[in-house]
Image (spheres, rainbow, N blue to C red):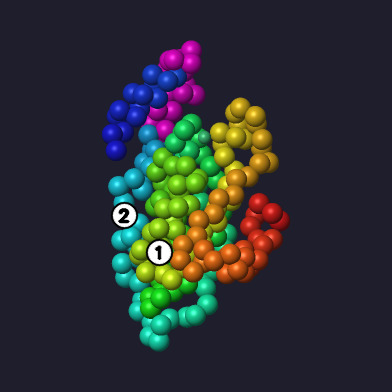
Amino acid sequence: MDSERIQRAVTELLLAIGEDPSRPGLARTPERVAEACEEFFGGLHEDPLALLADSIPVGGGGPSEAVVVRDISFRSICEHHLLPFLGVAHIAYLPSDRIVGLGRLPRVVDTLASRPQLQERLTEEIADTLERGLDARGVLVVLDAVHGCVAARGSRQEAASTLTLASRGELSDPVRRAEIMSLLGRSGPAHD
Ligand code: ZN
């Protein structure tokens, strides 16, 4: 990432809104924003499939029931406004003959979230990564997030959260999907 270039752009933005980039409160702002960008967009050139490369083979066709991990916190940056959206991801997958260390799922989410994103696309990308990376028989991904661009500007709906869902394979079946959704029900900080 070109930190110098980000810093020049931030200085330019501050000038454009009529601020004085040299006043004490703003003097280090370009540098801070550049550091934040490293974090926000650090997943841009990382391959989330690599995180699943050492999945663990299990015999006998694997567990027949879904593995469900809920309330994985994530933050991403909306590509339309470059404002953060924050929330939780719930993930379910039906293993074929491989499972993955549970700690890998939050890392898959984080890698894909650390890019300029849309919540809808992020949801689909997580589902595709798990389907391909684990050869899963089914995947269900639900994201529940509050968007800076909705909460802080425009209609200023601070309490509005956006729910998106992507399903693959056997978990696209309405009955199986409903079963998982009921497991996820009443979960998550957004609902407690
Ligand atoms: Zn936005």
Can residue 72 be seen here? The reply is no
Q: Residue at x 44, y 74 (%)?
A: 95
**From the viewer's perspective, is residue 95 above or below residue 21?**
below
45 or 125, which lies in front?
Answer: 125
Q: Residue furthest top?
A: 18
Expressed as whole percent of the image width and height from the top left, the position of residue 125 reads 41, 53
Position of residue 18 in the picture relative to residue 2 (left or right): right
Q: Residue at x 35, y 57 (%)?
A: 48
Three-letter code for the amino acid on which mark 1 is drawn: Glu
128 or 41, which lies in front?
Answer: 128
Q: Residue furthest right?
A: 192
SS for callout 2? loop
Magenta region: which residues? 15-33
Identify the disc placed on residue 78: none
SS for callout 1? helix
Expressed as whole percent of the image width and height from the top left, the position of residue 143 reads 55, 53
**From the viewer's perspective, is residue 17 above or below residue 138?**
above
Q: Residue at x 40, y 43 (%)?
A: 115
Three-letter code for the amino acid on which mark 2 is drawn: Asp
16 or 129, which lies in front?
Answer: 129
Position of residue 19 in the picture relative to residue 12 (left or right): right
- Front position among marks 2 and 1: 1
Q: Reply yes or no: does residue 177 show up in magenta.
A: no
Query: What's the distance in space between the residues labelled 2 and 1, CA to CA?
Result: 15 Å
Residue bearing the label numbered 1: 131
Residue bearing the label numbered 2: 47
Q: Residue furthest bottom?
A: 60
Expressed as whole percent of the image width and height from the top left, the position of residue 102 reads 46, 69
Expressed as whole percent of the image width and height from the top left, the position of residue 13 reads 42, 20
